[in-house]
Amino acid sequence: TFYVPAGEYVITEPLVLNSANLIGAGADKSVIIADFDDPSEPIIRAGRSSTIRDIQIRFKDGLVTGGEGKGERVAVFTAGRWSLQRGSTLSNVRIANVGTGLYSPGTTGDLEADSFSVTYDSIAIEDFSYRGVDFTSRVRTGNVFRNLYISSGRFEADAAFYFGGEESETFLQSLTVADTRAKRPIHLGGARALAADVIRLQNVQATKTGGLIVWEDSNGSIERLIVEDCQAASGGSVVEIGGAEYSSADFQTLRYLRIGRLSLSGLNPDGAADFLLFRREMTGEPFYVDVQDYAYEADGEAQRAAYEAFPVTDGQQLVFLAKGRLTASGPTEQRPAARLCPFYTTYEDTTLGRTVTWTGEGWQ
């Protein structure tokens, strides 16, 4: 175990942790500042069973320029001699002034830089130029992400939180992306059986056509999705749904997203054209979406009508099981008129004394 007392410590080469602990006096007290020229060198290489706690990690002012790409100016690289794994923990860590905060790229040279059974808890990643979290290795399982705060208003980033490769059996609790401009703010690719508690976007701008959240070859659930004062590019959406492949186009099995509660306010204030809540341009097997509860704060009748219309891609690319709660029973004249899902929305008609189903063209 290496203890770092309160103070600022300048290092001129990466720290390598293999089954070792790096413990500071607090994320606002113990600060490690990296000062080396090679942008491909991370500040910390953390491998096997290691702990990083109560510390701040950053590059020296002036080293991060905004032009960083993949794997450049990385704070924590998830491999020392071996991949970071089996009970390793990063807790109460602040990462700032970096290209990428957390990086798990898979095979890099002679290293397997994966991440499995690791807890990432109470981590703030700020002023990153490329990606806050960049996990693209092929084999990741059992990771826990808890209380992540990601923000970068200083640069136009590529992504705040990026999953690629394969991430299975992962728990994502309380991810907040705030005050950020990024091409694709959140990209969830290859997430198998994802269990997310709260995902919140606040004052986030997507600068590339697409979704504030991209859901690609993934399945699972988000208990609460909160979107506040955000803006997508023209032709964008809150959630863009792509493919549903497990291992090849022959296995279109990942075709379900459940959202427990979708909450919207101040969305797309500049009114980008052709904006949808959910978008899918792909053809083929339909993708199923279940929004169990839906709430919004509207500024005026026009905005209320837009929210209530629940605009999504037309056709069979997306099939909704629900678009929030609707009145379930009552007389004929009180049947719901908006957010109806063909063959899934039912109504107990007390006038008729029977249950009717919306077909897309009428009630039967």
Image (cartoon, rainbow, N blue to C red):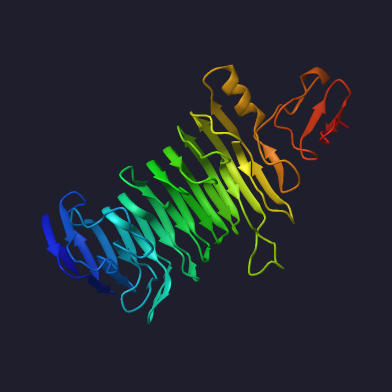
* Location of residue 353 in the rendering, given as x and y in whole percent from the top left corner: 88, 25
Residue occupying the point 45% across, 47% down:
185
**Left or right: residue 304 compared with residue 92:** right
Q: Position of residue 130 (x, y in %)?
A: 37, 55
Residue 80 rendering spot, x and y as whole percentages? 31, 75
Can residue 88 be seen at all in this image of the molecule? yes
Q: Position of residue 79 (x, y in %)?
A: 34, 73
Question: Given the current orientation, which residue lies at the most extreme bottom position?
Answer: 110
Q: Residue at x 52, y 41 (%)?
A: 224
Residue for point 35% across, 68% down: 78
- Residue 338 higher or lower than 108, as above or below: above
Camera-side residue of 266 and 122: 266
Is 183 on the left-hand or right-hand side of 82?
right
Q: Is residue 249 left or right of residue 203?
A: right
Say which of 234 and 338 sits in front.
234
Q: How many marks?
A: 0
User: Which quadrant is home to the C terminus?
Assistant: top right
Quarter location, residue 189: bottom right
Asked whether residue 5 is in view, the answer is no
Position of residue 153 relative to residue 100, above or below, is above
Query: Is 349 drawn above or below residue 198 in the view shown?
Result: above
Q: Nearer the viewer, residue 96 or 55?
A: 96
Q: For the point 41% across and 55% down, which residue is it?
A: 145
Check the picture and name the quadrant holding the N terminus. Answer: bottom left
Q: Where is residue 33, by image quadrant?
A: bottom left
